[in-house]
Amino acid sequence: MAARLLIVLALLHSLASATASVPIPVPIQVLDSLPETAVHARKNGLVTIILLTLPDCSSCEYVKTRHLIPLQSSLEGKALLREIVLSDQPLVDYDGTTTTAEEFAQRYGANFAPTVLFLDADGKRLSKSLVGLSSRDFYGFYLEKSIDNSFKKMKQQSASNHST
C-alpha cells in the first residue's frame, strides 16, 4: 500500500512539473483608451501592435489565438499587444479626444476585420497593416515580417532622434 502511494505521489509530482512548464496564454488587453498605452510604449521604446476585431468574428479569433497570443512571450520588452473591438462605443484616442473604435479604424484605412496595425507611441504607422485573413498558410510569415519591419523602423526613428 505504501509503495502504491509513493508511485501515485511520484506520478502527480511529474505531472505537476510537466504542466508547470507550459505557459498559460494571457488574453490580449482590450482597449477603450490609448493614452496609457502610448505613454508606456514611449517610455519603453515599444512598438504597439493593435488587433482590430469584430464580435463573433471567426477570422479575428483565429488570428488572435493561433498567431498573436502565442507570440506574446517573444514580444515581451519589444512590443505591446492590444485589441480594439470595432463598435460605436467611445474610444479615447492618442491625443485624448474621444472617438469611436470604428472611426479610429477608418483613419488607418481598416475596412475589414481582422486588421493588425503596427504603430509607434504617437499612433504613426510603422509597417503595412495586415488586413483580413486571405491566407492561413502564410499569415504567420506576413505577421512576423510586419513585426520585424516595425522593429527596424522604430530603431531607425530612435537613432535619428538621438542624433539630432
Image (cartoon, grey):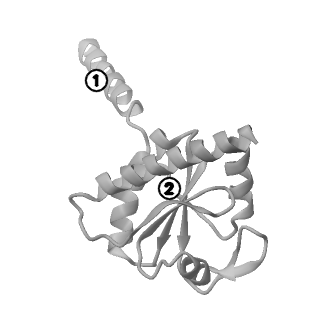
Crowding at mark 2 (Cα within 10 Å: few <14, some 14-19, many 20+): some
Q: Nearer the viewer, residue 153 or 146?
A: 153
Vertical placement of residue 155 versus 120, above or below = above
Tell me what residue is drawn at x 31 percent, y 18 percent: 10
What is the spatial separation of the Cα atoms under label 1 and label 2, in whole angstroms? 31 Å
Q: Position of residue 139 (x, y in %)?
A: 29, 59
Q: Which residue is mark 2?
A: 27
Tell me what residue is drawn at x 42 percent, y 38 percent: 23
Position of 76 with respect to 163 (left or right) is: left
Q: Position of residue 121 (x, y in %)?
A: 67, 56
Amino acid type for the residue under numbered disc 2: Pro
Would you identify the image quadrant in which residue 104 lies? bottom right
Q: Locate the C terminus by quadrant.
A: top right
Q: Which residue is mark 1?
A: 11
Tell me what residue is drawn at x 64 percent, y 64 percent: 123
SS type, badge 2: loop
Residue extending farthest to the top is: 3
Tell me what residue is drawn at x 45 percent, y 78 percent: 55
SS type, badge 1: helix
Q: Locate the N terminus by quadrant.
A: top left
Residue extending farthest to the bottom is: 88
Position of 94 with respect to 31 (left or right) is: right
- For the image shown, how many numbered marks are present on the structure? 2
Which of disc 2 and disc 1 is earlier in sequence? 1
